[in-house]
Image (tube, rainbow, N blue to C red):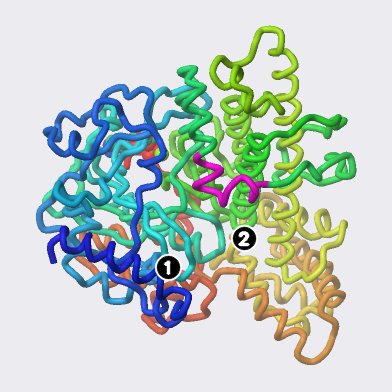
């Protein structure tokens, strides 16, 4: 089907669907739609200012592609730019869950149109009928603590927004690795297969764990595209999607240029079109002196948290509430990273999502042996993006965002005054505005910490099978567990999964607890300095004792209570997480050995991480869920991708 026909059909179907939706919403959308029929929109490009050099899709389309290559772009949030076409793309994998969440029907991935769109060879626009023209976003960012200037989508191109009629969720669908854009700087706009496999798998793995993330629909190999990194490598494209691709860096760039008008436009867009309107944002501050910071333990250990300040009343306008929403979302996401031992590896502001999504997968990793100092980023010599620093780094990023929004936050109820909108703050009013903004940012810091801790405690309690939370759990169970894992160099996620399957009846004497303890050891035993087999077992046994007492408190001793507890724990503690060594093995098999099956099997494991087995290849499943090979633990990646 031609794209012209496809697009006009979409329009017809869209209006029909709209009418039918109320009557047949379940059956109708339950089947899923074709890509062509999926309702599409371009809210982003219609509401925000385009690159003045190419104000319309037509002007960009008529330009030679080379004219859309790197340069500075001002007064804009995006440039209309088409993907580079590519010969003989090979679809390597599709996430079935992503298909479903987008509202696409099963089997759609086999159509020629699907394959053409997700590899950048076709898009939903033509000169006669219009449609949605692809675009690359413009943003800046703070990288490793230094201002990096204009960045932007250097190799990601958004194709369209689509709304799943069943869930009403709108996603921005984009492809990564489809050629240069005005934001490619000195690079080639390509992505290598290696890093694309990693992003494809981890996006879907995090989502399956319930951790907010951008998603991956498909992975396409570009056999004709040879990409130069340290060596020549095959190119690839991941088709990915998210409720929003706005980053803190999207605010940083206009802020750095003093473009207050753009910041206000962007903040308004975020509230109205990314979140569900201003009314959906958090109400007046509920956090106050009732939550003194120094009464709560710091789970990340070693991170200096600010002490709670006295809270005086300050006028909180709608932009302050937007800021708080962004802070709260990021607090919850970073709490989930800490609870599941996930590290992004490059938490620059251009990789930090307004929507609170885990975003931009470079040298990420899941923790192997618990080590709070660990960073998966080979180039991160200062350990800026190490596990233990993630909560404070996200807050650091939020302070940068607070600076961007400072004028809007600080304006209080003057926010809609004409003179403020057009001219900004007067010299006289500035000190009060700054004070107000600072107070709100500081208060949001306390809110961030509280939301983080609540979510972290909630998730850790669940992972340990607890139904209630007790003040003493933090020290006795969480901290002591982490210290034990660190001291004995034991695997973080394996511990929780193995604990899930331990019966309380196997823990009812000290002797038994010491017999159970080695199930948490590696094949070769345990690590650390100064422990003997006996003292290592003893330390774990002591923890198990405290834990089993808390489980008994929460679950009682009825006959089936322990089975229920085990099932509840297995539903939150993954059997499978895509560790570095597994990703390396898949990359090697797909890239060097032409294996096309392993990727599908691993994706299936990533999509169903809590399964005990997957019925695919038992030996492989056991290996991928088992001990991390000794010399492949705590691997590091370089940023070259
Ligand atoms: P990242 O470290 O992947 O978040 O990328 C930082 C910035 O560099 C972003 O603006 C990317 O779009 C850009 N970038 C990274 N790799 C490439 C590439 N191969 N081609 C073009 N731009 C890139
Ligand atoms: Mg990035």
Q: Where ligand 1 lies, by image quadrant? A: top left
Quarter-of-image position of residue 383 = top right
- Quarter of the image with the N terminus is bottom left
Q: Is residue 8 left or right of residue 613?
A: left
- Residue 578's place in the image compared with 511, above or below, is above
Q: Is residue 593 visible?
A: no
What residue is at 71 percent from the left and 84 percent from the top? 564
| Mark 2 burial class by Cα count in 10 Å: few <14, some 14-19, many 20+ | many
Could you say which is closer to the camera, residue 233 or residue 102? 102
Rendering coords of residue 464 (x, y %): 72, 67
User: Of helix, strand and loop, which one carries label 2?
Assistant: loop
Residue under circle 1?
Answer: 165
Rendering coords of residue 46 (x, y %): 36, 41
Q: Residue 278 in magenta?
A: yes
Q: Which residues are magenta?
A: 269-281
Residue 29: give its label. none
Q: Residue 81 in magenta?
A: no
What residue is at 73 percent from the left and 58 percent from the top? 481
What residue is at 60 percent from the left and 36 percent from the top? 393
Residue 526: give its label. 2
């Amino acid at each position: 089907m031609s794209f012209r026909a496809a697009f006009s059909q979409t329009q017809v179907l869209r209006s029909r669907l709209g009418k039918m939706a109320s009557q047949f919403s379940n059956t109708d959308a339950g089947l899923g739609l074709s890509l062509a029929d999926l309702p599409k929109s371009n809210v982003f490009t219609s509401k925000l200012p385009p690159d003045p050099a190419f104000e319309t899709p037509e002007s960009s389309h008529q330009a030679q592609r080379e004219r859309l290559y790197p340069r500075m772009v001002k007064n804009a949030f995006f440039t209309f730019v088409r993907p580079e076409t590519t010969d003989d793309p090979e679809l390597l994998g599709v996430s079935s869950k992503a298909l479903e969440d987008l509202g696409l029907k099963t089997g759609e991935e086999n159509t020629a149109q699907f394959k053409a769109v997700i590899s950048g060879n076709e898009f939903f626009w033509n000169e006669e009928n219009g449609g949605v023209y692809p675009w690359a976003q413009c943003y800046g960012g703070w990288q490793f603590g230094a201002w990096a200037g204009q960045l932007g989508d250097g190799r990601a191109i958004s194709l369209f927004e689509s709304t799943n009629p069943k869930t009403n969720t709108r996603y921005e669908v984009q492809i990564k690795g489809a050629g240069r854009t005005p934001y490619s700087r000195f690079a080639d706009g390509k992505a290598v297969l290696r890093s694309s496999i990693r992003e494809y798998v981890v996006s879907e793995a995090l989502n399956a764990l319930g951790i907010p993330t951008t998603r991956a629909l498909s992975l396409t190999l570009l056999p004709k595209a040879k990409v130069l990194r340290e060596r020549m490598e095959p190119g690839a494209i991941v088709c990915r999607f998210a409720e929003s691709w706005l980053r803190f860096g999207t605010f940083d760039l206009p802020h750095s240029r003093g473009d207050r008008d753009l910041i206000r436009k962007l903040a308004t867009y975020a509230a109205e079109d990314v979140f569900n309107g201003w009314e959906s944002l958090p109400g007046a501050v509920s956090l106050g002196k009732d939550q003194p910071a120094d009464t709560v333990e710091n789970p990340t250990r070693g991170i200096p948290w600010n002490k709670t300040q006295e809270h005086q009343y300050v006028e909180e306008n709608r932009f302050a509430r937007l800021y708080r929403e962004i802070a709260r979302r990021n607090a919850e996401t970073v709490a989930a990273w800490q609870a599941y031992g996930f590290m992004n590896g490059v938490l620059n502001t251009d990789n930090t999502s307004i929507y609170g999504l885990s975003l931009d997968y470079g040298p990420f990793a899941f923790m192997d042996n618990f080590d709070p100092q660990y960073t998966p980023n080979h180039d991160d010599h200062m350990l800026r993006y190490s596990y233990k620093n993630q909560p404070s780094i996200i807050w650091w990023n939020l302070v940068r965002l607070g600076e961007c929004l400072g004028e809007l936050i600080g304006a209080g109820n003057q926010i809609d005054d004409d003179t403020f909108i057009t001219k900004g703050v007067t010299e006289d009013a500035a000190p009060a505005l700054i004070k107000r903004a600072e107070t709100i940012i500081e208060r949001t810091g306390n809110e961030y910490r509280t939301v983080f801790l609540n979510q972290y405690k909630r998730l850790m309690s669940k992972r340990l099978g607890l139904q209630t939370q007790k003040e003493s759990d933090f020290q006795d169970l969480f901290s002591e567990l982490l210290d034990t894992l660190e001291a004995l160099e034991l695997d973080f996620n394996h511990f929780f999964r193995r604990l899930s399957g331990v019966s309380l009846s196997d823990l009812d004497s000290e002797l038994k607890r010491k017999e159970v303890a080695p199930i948490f050891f590696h094949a070769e035993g345990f690590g650390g300095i100064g422990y003997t087999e006996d003292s290592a077992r003893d330390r774990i046994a002591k923890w198990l004792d405290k834990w089993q007492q808390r489980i008994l408190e929460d679950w009682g001793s009825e006959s089936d209570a322990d089975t229920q507890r085990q099932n509840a724990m297995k539903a939150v503690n993954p059997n499978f997480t895509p560790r570095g060594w597994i990703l390396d093995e898949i990359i090697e098999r797909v890239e060097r050995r032409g294996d096309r099956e392993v990727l599908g099997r691993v994706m299936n494991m990533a999509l169903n991480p809590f399964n005990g087995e997957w019925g695919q290849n038992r030996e492989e499943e056991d290996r991928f869920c088992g001990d991390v090979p000794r010399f492949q633990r705590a691997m590091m990646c370089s940023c070259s991708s």
